[in-house]
Amino acid sequence: MTKLRVGLLFGGRSGEHEVSINSARAIAKALSAEENANKYEILPFYIQKNGRWLAGVVPQKVLTTGSPLLESEESTSEGNLTSNPQAQTLSKWQSPSQVAQVDVWFPILHGPNGEDGTIQGLLTLMQVPFVGSGVLGSAMGMDKIAMKIAFEQAGLPQVKYKAITRAQVWSNPCVFPKLCDDIEAALGYPAFVKPANLGSSVGIAKVRSRQELEAALDSAASYDRRLVVEAGVVAREVECAVLGNDQPQASIVGEITYDSDFYDYETKYTEGRADLLIPAPLPDAIARQVQDMALQAFAAVDAAGLARVDFFYVEATQEVLINEINTLPGFTATSMYPQLWAHSGVPFPQLVDRLIQLAIARHSPS
C-alpha cells in the first residue's frame, strides 16, 4: 500500500508560532499512531519567524524538541534555503524541493499568514489538497469585521459592536474624541477593544472608562489597521466544534471557565488558569441551539474541514450570542477542538485522518 505523503506545515511569522509547533507535534504523533502509520508518511515543513521555509532534518528537530529554531541558528539540512545572502535578498522565501513530493498539505499555522487566507492561496496555486478552509473561509474567519457582517447576513444574534479603522484612531485631535463619544453612546462600558485580524486574544483589552478606551484603541491600532469594539456582556463562554465540508457535523458543546477578568492570552496558555467542561452543563435545548448556530456560522463564512465556534450564553435571558469562528483552532491534545470531538466519539488519530480525507474529497469532488 502506497502511503500518502502529508506535508505538515507549521511555525510561521505570527505571534502564535509556539502554539503552532505544539499543534504540529500532536498531529505528527497522531499520524504516527498505529491506525495511521500504514496510510501516511509525514513530510514536515517549518517556517521560521523570519519567513524562511525549512525541510528535512531541522523541522523534525523542532517537532522533537518543541522549541523554535532561532534565526541565528545555521542549518545545513537538505532542502533548506540557500545560504547565499544575495539570493535571500532577492526573495524573502523559497520553497524547499521536498514541496513537490507532497500529496496533501496539513497547514497548522495559527494567526496572520497562517489562517487568514494567505497560505491557503499559496496552497491553492500548488493544486494540491490541503486541510481546512479555502481563501474565502479563512479570510472571513480571521477578520472579525468581515465575520460579523457574514453573521449578520445569516441572521445570527451577536453583541453590539462598532468597526473602527486605524486612520480614525490616529487622526487629528478633533476627530478622535468624537469617535470615542460615538463608541460610548453606542456600546457603553465595559467594552472590549480588539484588533480585527489577530488570534489568541493578542492585543485585546477590556475597558471601563474613557481613559482606558483611548489607550486600548491606540494599542490595538498598533497591531492592525482594522479594529472592532464590542459591548461587554455577562455570560458563560461555550464552544462547539464543526467537522466536514458541505454536510458538516457539530460536536457536543463545551464550556470554558477561568479566574481572570477575561479570557486573555495569558489565561489561555497558562496551565491551570482555565478549565474546560465537556460536556457543558447546559439545558438540552440550549446545547442544540449552539450546535445549530455553529453549523450556520460554518456555512456563513464558507468554512471547510474544521472550525471551532465560540458563543456567549446569557443565562439570565436564555440568549445565545455568537462570538466568533476559528477556522484553524489550536490542535494540541489538550485543545478544545480535538477534546470536543474526542468526547463526541472521534479520538485524536481518527480526527486527523478524517480531516485529511475531507481535504482530498474537497479537492477532487466526485
Image (tube, helix red, strand yellow):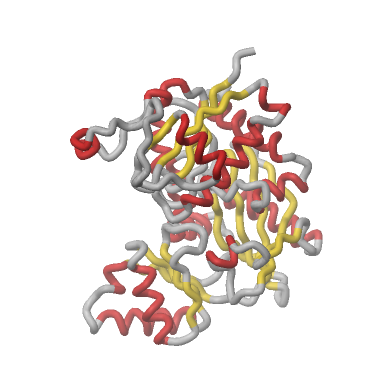
Indicate whether 323 appears above or below 84. below
Q: State whether residue 326 appears in this view.
A: yes
**Residue 304, image x and y in percent?**
55, 40
Name the residue rendered at 32%, 62% in the picture: 225
Q: State whether residue 246 appears in this view.
A: no
Quadrant of the frame with the C terminus = top right
Quadrant of the rendered image containing residue 306: top right
Quadrant of the rendered image containing residue 293: bottom right
Residue 260 relative to residue 153: left or right: right
Name the residue rendered at 48%, 80% in the picture: 207
**Residue 61, image x and y in percent?**
51, 37
Name the residue rendered at 63%, 31% in the picture: 31
Quadrant of the frame with the N terminus = top right
Indicate whether 202 appears above or below 356. below
How many marks the image carries: the answer is 0
Name the residue rendered at 64%, 22% in the picture: 39
